[in-house]
Amino acid sequence: MSRVTDGREASLRPGRTRAGERAAPPASSTGRVRRHPLLRRRRVVVGPHAVDVRGTFDPALPPVVLVHGVGMSGAYFLRLADELAATRDVYALDLPGYGTTPKPRRPLSVAELGEAAAGAVAALGLSRPVLVGHSMGCQIVVDAVRDHPGLCSGYVLVGPTVDPDAPSRPGQAWRLLRDTLREPPPTNALVLRDYLRMGPLRYLRTARSMVRDRIEEDIRGCAVPGLLVRGGRDPIAPRDWVRRLARAAPDARVVEIPGAPHNVQHTDPKELAAACAPFLDACRPARRPDAPA
């Protein structure tokens, strides 16, 4: 069972200047523009779990759903969400046990998180959105796409894990350390905050499921088009691995953001949005029943 519960609204629904384009963000009473002014908060219930959502909730625009990686939350997608929200109906998820959502009794596996992501899409009433995953979120997205035919019109995998050349938690930890030295301080601070919120034991147990998951096999069952993206300086998702993963998919291609580290959606959101734009435009989701004509 999936349903939507009432939540606090961070802003009023924005207007538009012309068809398919939003108006300028509203200002606060002090004249300052609010952070992420186009996004509102809601909580959806998916089976026994909750998923918190920051989204634009605008059925007139094609939907995009952002799925975070291990230990993280939708917070590190918000810069990208701001870029996409001019022309897309954007939703950044906090999956069960991440960000602001209640923690399940035990950490959910990659497959269970894939079910939660698919359930959130249904609870939000979205028709064939594009699913965008980052890091372990790519594994979650691939599971959701494979196990739910017709769920989405396409998928984007940003910095996908796990490269079979580093198939263990120590191997991934070494790559994560190398990437930390390439990320700017604000990104590392955000990552550390979310990791501490999740807790080390839950992180390690989830990482065990992450390294056992075989995205390179699961992606063969993804029938819709895919786009794989990596930062040019990402040690967690090396170029050769991302290319091999794309070749394993029925229909996928690769784009690289020069000079970007693993968390490209936070460090280079404009460049990532521009790189994804042609693919997003090519995906044609069905019109939602509540969308205006």
Image (spheres, rainbow, N blue to C red):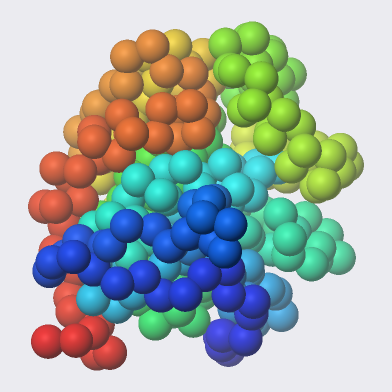
Rendered-image quadrant of the N terminus: bottom right
Where 115 sits versus 184, above or below?
A: below
Residue 123 horizontal side relative to residue 192, left or right: left
Residue shown at the point (23%, 76%) measured from the top left: 60
Residue at 24%, 33% in the rendered image: 275
Q: Which residue does the image show at 58% across and 75% down from the upper left?
A: 9
Q: Position of residue 28 (x, y in %)?
A: 54, 61
Please state which of residues 89 and 93 is positioned toward the viewer in this rendering.
Answer: 89
x and y percentages locating residue 137 in the rendered image: 52, 46
Looking at this view, is 19 or 207 the one in front?
A: 19
> What residue lies at 58% left-to-right and 17% top-to-bottom?
183
Q: Is residue 62 left or right of residue 131?
A: left
Q: Is residue 72 visible?
A: yes
271 or 122, nearer to the observer: 271
Question: Residue 17 in the image: x percent, y percent?
Answer: 18, 65
For residue 64, say whether it is visible: no
**Quarter that holds the C terminus:** bottom left
Left-right relation of 72 to 119 = right
Up the image or down, 50 lies above or below 190; here it is below
Number of numbered discs: 0
Q: Is residue 217 left or right of residue 262?
A: left
Q: Position of residue 37 (x, y in %)?
A: 48, 59
